[in-house]
Each structure stands twice: as C-alpha cells, then as structure tokens.
Image: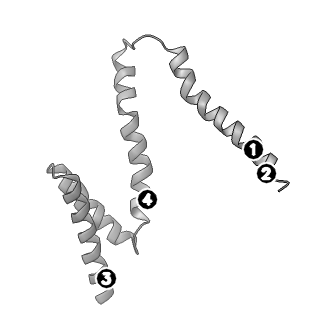
Amino acid sequence: MPDFPKFLIYLAVMAGVTYLVRMLPLMLVRKKFENVFIRSFLYYVPYTVLATMTVPAVFYCTGSVVSAAVGFAVALAMAYFERSLVSVAASACGAVLVCELVMKML
C-alpha cells in the first residue's frame, strides 16, 4: 500500500492537466472565428485525428500486411460508392477472410 498515495498524486496531476487542456480554450477564446482558414482547419481536425489513430491499426490487426491491405482497399472502395458503415465493415472483414484463406492454401 505504500504506492497508493503516490498513485493518488499522479491521478490528481493527470486529471488537472486533462481538465486544463479542455477548459483553457473555452476560457481564452470567447468569440467565433472569422478566419475561413482557421474555421476549415478546426472543422477537419477530428477527422484527421480519427484517421491517424485508425489507419495504422488496420495494417497490424490481421495475420499479414497483405490481407490488411486487401481489406483496406475493399473498405475504401465501398466507402467511395457510399455504402453503409455496416456493409463497408462486413465487406472488409470478408475480403480479409478470403485473402487469409487463399494465402494459407498457397
């Protein structure tokens, strides 16, 4: 139990830093951004962060990079043709499964 007080200190510091990062922009910026570049930049930040976290994980979640690339390509193609999220995910999983089975047979 001697590490419990240290844990509480670390937890308090982490909570404080997380709170400050979220609270300071709300306190410092009170008016709407008029600059079109900044508004468009801030509009695309969530999509960029999501893609940055998701795409690398896609290539390491299967048995090989080849099957991951096939699944990723199928998902991109289905998304390009504006299919639903469920059909995109199911098609990508199916493509990975087929690719893995073909690679095992070879």
Task: Judge by depth and name the residue closer to the eye, 96 or 29.
Answer: 29
Q: Residue at 34% of width from left, 71% of height from top?
A: 66
Task: Report if the CB atoms under discs 1 and 3 are less than 8 Å apart.
Answer: no
Q: Of callouts 1 and 4, which one flags the residue occurring earlier in the amino acid sequence?
A: 1
Disc 1 to disc 4, how far (Cα)?
Answer: 32 Å
Please, what secondary structure does the residue beneath circle 2 have? helix
Q: Of callouts 2 and 4, which one flags the residue occurring earlier in the amino acid sequence?
A: 2
- Measuring from the top left, give residue 37's x and y in whole percent: 36, 20
Q: Is residue 67 left or right of residue 74?
A: right
- Measuring from the top left, give residue 18's x and y in whole percent: 60, 35
Whether residue 106 is visible here, answered yes or no, is no
Q: List the residue tagged with mark 1.
A: 8
Disc 2 to disc 1, how far (Cα)?
Answer: 6 Å
Are there few (<14), some (14-19), or many (20+) residues within 10 Å of tag 1?
A: few
Disc 2 to disc 3, how far (Cα)?
Answer: 50 Å
Above or below residue 41? Residue 72 is below
Task: Report if the CB atoms under discs 2 and 1 are less than 8 Å apart.
Answer: yes
Task: Report if the CB atoms under discs 1 and 4 are less than 8 Å apart.
Answer: no
- Measuring from the top left, give residue 79's x and y in whole percent: 20, 51
Whether residue 73 is visible here, answered yes or no, is yes
Above or below residue 87? Residue 38 is above
Task: Judge by depth and name the residue closer to the eye, 10 or 100.
Answer: 10
Q: List the residue tagged with mark 3.
A: 103
Q: List the residue tagged with mark 2.
A: 4
The kind of residue tagged 1 is Leu
Q: Residue at 70% of width from left, 42% of height from top?
A: 11
